Amino acid sequence: MNDRCEIPTEPCGRDRSTLVWSLSLGAPDPVKGLQRWLYDALRLAIVNGRLPGGSVLPGTRTLAREYSLARGTVAAAYEQLLAEGYLVTRVGSGTRVSAVLPDHSHPAKPPVPTSVPIETTHTRESHAPWIKRLGESSSPFPLAGVNALPRPFHPHRGDIRLFPVELWRQLHVRQLRPSRLLTLNDTSPAGLPALRTAIAEHLAIARGVRVPPEQIVVVGSVHQALDLCMRVLTGPGDTVWMEDPGYVGARQIMHASGARVVDIPVDHDGLRVPDGIREAPSAALIYVTPTRHAPLGVSLSAERRASLLSWAAASGAVIFEDDYDSEYCFRSRPLPALRSLPGADAHVVLAGTFNKLMFPSLRLAYVVLPPRLVEPFIRAASVTVRSANGLTQAVLADFLSEGHFDRHVRRTRKIYASRARVFEHAASKHWQGLIDVQPAVAGLDVVGHLLPFDEQAATQKLSLAGIDAAPLSRYTHCHTQRPGLVLGFAPFNEEEIDRAAQQFAAALRKA
């Protein structure tokens, strides 16, 4: 069977649609599923630049013939890539690779020079079990640098324009005085003591978690905290619970560890704890977002919190609490952290991040550990990531201890609450009969359930109109949800929200 297809690209000085070069997608994988295999192979070729922006893809009939696939299989893969914004189609110009890749708004990579081999086969890395489990071709995170502002209504983002940059610069300069140059030395893998103390003081006030600084470890992100917990607490084949729907990045870390991931459904009261106890009673770790579920926005009920803690105490399981979006509640006080409840100290790992609250490239987060896990966690960090940036930790310690962080959160909470109301008003005004949007009572995004459309058709139309929306199915694995979109409102001011809402409505009404 021929495993190569001809896809146009752009040699030097020529229009990329006039000549073709041969791009190998490898052999189809019937075990994986032919449609999924083709989607993954084409998407990876787009993301890593082997299919540059503007490249013309062959027709569905041609590609189906090359790979002995059903034409419908190829069409379905193309439709998914169109819906997610990796491809664009225009009358008379065929189907092309988008010049701007979805989700991250960065240009597609330029073509590789023709003198460089397109693909190296039979490398040792290509067979690494960890990479295979990770699912590189479907990574939810950018594989290249991102500097552009998000397009409406990209979810899970704050507005970096609100951050007090000048104040941060002044604090940074202060740390670089000659009297403080020891800050430039190596930092403990546990984190700078001043920052751990400042985080402990913040958690006691904001989340009701009273813990000594020695039980706090500074990391780069919640993902890193989860990865280290999986290394410390689980081995290949161990069982873990994952919310379904749930955070895609957490699921991939669990799969990469070699654990057996059991998908536990989520309803209006959060994670269905009785289902988890019944389906996986010997789980070693449970991932949960109890304050505000990602992405549905519901909270874990008091009854289920108590049930989860009681079961963890009896079984010896560890609960990984991702304190997702807990700082932004607009109509009531946030629920206390699960880690703050009686008896949680020995069984709950609490992880939170400053990256969304301040700016994404900060790359600082924290994890609150049970006493017995502190030493093994720090050892694991010391031989993997070593430590987070010490200079930035020192600046953040001052930012927290001098009250700047609390002021920044209070200010942005008011602004985001105002934008949430504007978003609700715009949805009510422009989207009647198109999408049923939940009230924006907390967090940086909301879920809207589509009325007359499926997700692929809706996201395709919206992407062509300059609107980003995450299909709800992206977060689901086994337990289906009503067709819907996850929509962010926080990075956009009132004028931007209303204008984009009109574009949103026009795009869907054209369908």
Image (cartoon, rainbow, N blue to C red):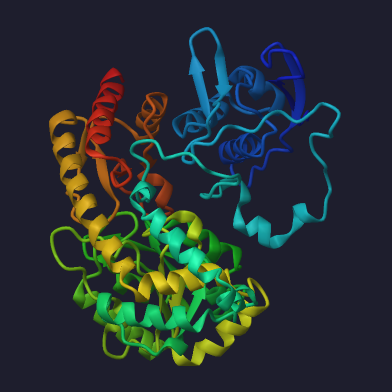
Residue furthest to the top in view is: 92
Residue 53: image location, x then y, percent? 61, 26
Residue under the image location 46 percent in, 59 percent down: 169
Q: For the N terminus, which image quadrant?
A: top right
Res 465 seen here: yes
Picture quadrant where residue 94 is located? top right
**Of residues 338 and 301, the one drawn nearer to the viewer in this rendering:** 338
- 430 horizontally vs 112: left or right: left
Residue 77: image location, x then y, percent? 54, 32
**Of residues 28 and 366, the one drawn nearer to the viewer in this rendering:** 366
- 459 horizontally vs 186: left or right: left
Residue under the image location 17 percent in, 29 percent down: 430
Residue under the image location 31 percent in, 73 percent down: 273
Residue furthest to the right in view is: 115
Picture quadrant where residue 380 is located? bottom right
Task: Decide: is 231 above or below 452.
Answer: below
